[in-house]
Image (cartoon, rainbow, N blue to C red):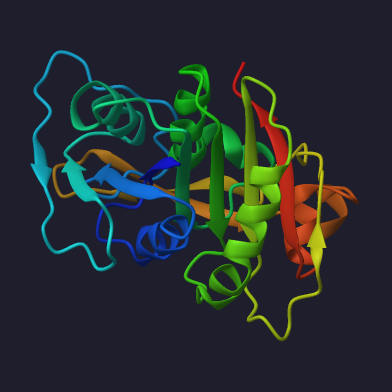
């Protein structure tokens, strides 16, 4: 099996190293990731400017190749398919993202955006995320098991698996909840705080406000991670 690993947190993020390490157990793994942090860029595509592509010789885990692109997560998928790889991969894995991608936040996610691009190219894809600034222990402990399970499942064309790990270590984890519907709210709502720059221009700073548990809805992806469970959902790229 030939596997492409991408993300939106950058080539140097610890999450992509953990995902690549797990992926390498299942097949020949190539990493193509943004040079810089690209969270919340959804499916943004770079047009009318050059993309700088560079091979990375010191990627922290053994893979076939690792490349960085000074573009978006979707750019990385397209560059991988058109330039880096000699043939289309059998699977694209995106993540492990620093921050949940559940509920309405999925629409903004560069991690999920990259997986959607792969699915639109006819390639099975999975996206993985963990709570913001959480230790990767829960993800690392269960990642191989979940990959094996999802690879054995039938994945329809255009479908994407979306997996979110709670901010807990393996001993505290309360289980895996499968087929979680997407919550009809985000984990946070945005409030803009007004400040004033020295030149007199109004400057707005976005501040996230956590959504109340009562507004999230039971049995959803967002409820699962707040309950301390791994959430697995099926998304559709088209």
Instruction: Write the residue at 34% across / 30% down.
Output: 77
Residue 193 vs residue 232: left or right?
Answer: left
Question: Against 73, is 78 above or below?
Answer: above
- Residue 210 in sight in this render: no
Horizontal and vertical percent for residue 233?
Answer: 73, 43
Question: Against 68, is 237 above or below?
Answer: above
Question: Against 14, is 54 above or below?
Answer: above
Instruction: Write the residue at 79% across / 62% down.
Output: 176
**Residue found at the very far right of the displayed protein:** 218
Quarter the C terminus occupies: top right
- Residue 202 in sight in this render: yes
Horizontal and vertical percent for residue 120?
Answer: 50, 18
Residue 34 vs residue 208: left or right?
Answer: left
Horizontal and vertical percent for residue 187?
Answer: 66, 51
Horizontal and vertical percent for residue 37?
Answer: 29, 50
Q: Give the quarter of the image for residue 52.
A: top left
Q: Is 11 or 226 nearer to us in this picture?
A: 11
Question: Against 183, is 132 above or below?
Answer: below
Quarter the N terminus occupies: top left
Instruction: Write the residue at 62% across / 21% down.
Output: 158
């Amino acid at each position: 099996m030939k596997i492409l690993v991408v993300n939106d947190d950058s080539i140097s993020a610890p999450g992509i190293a953990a995902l690549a390490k797990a992926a390498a157990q299942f097949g020949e793994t190539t990493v193509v990731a943004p040079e810089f942090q690209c969270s919340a860029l959804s499916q943004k595509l770079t047009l009318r400017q050059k993309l700088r592509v560079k091979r990375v010789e010191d990627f922290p885990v053994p893979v076939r190749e690792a490349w960085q692109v000074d573009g978006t997560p979707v750019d990385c998928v397209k560059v991988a398919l058109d330039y880096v790889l000699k043939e289309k991969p059998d699977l694209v894995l995106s993540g492990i993202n620093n921050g949940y991608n559940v509920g309405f936040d999925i629409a903004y996610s560069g991690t999920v955006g990259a997986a959607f691009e792969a699915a639109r190219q006819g390639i099975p894809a999975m996206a993985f995320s963990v709570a913001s600034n959480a230790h990767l222990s829960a993800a690392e402990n269960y990642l191989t098991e979940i990959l094996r399970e999802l690879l054995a499942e039938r994945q329809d064309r255009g479908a994407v698996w979306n997996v979110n790990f709670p901010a807990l270590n393996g001993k505290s984890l309360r289980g895996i909840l499968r087929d979680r519907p997407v919550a009809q709210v985000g984990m946070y709502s945005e409030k803009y705080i007004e400040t004033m720059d020295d030149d007199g221009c109004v400057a707005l700073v976005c501040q996230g406000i956590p959504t109340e548990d009562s507004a999230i809805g039971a049995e959803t992806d967002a409820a699962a991670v707040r309950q301390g469970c791994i959430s697995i959902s099926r998304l559709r790229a088209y």
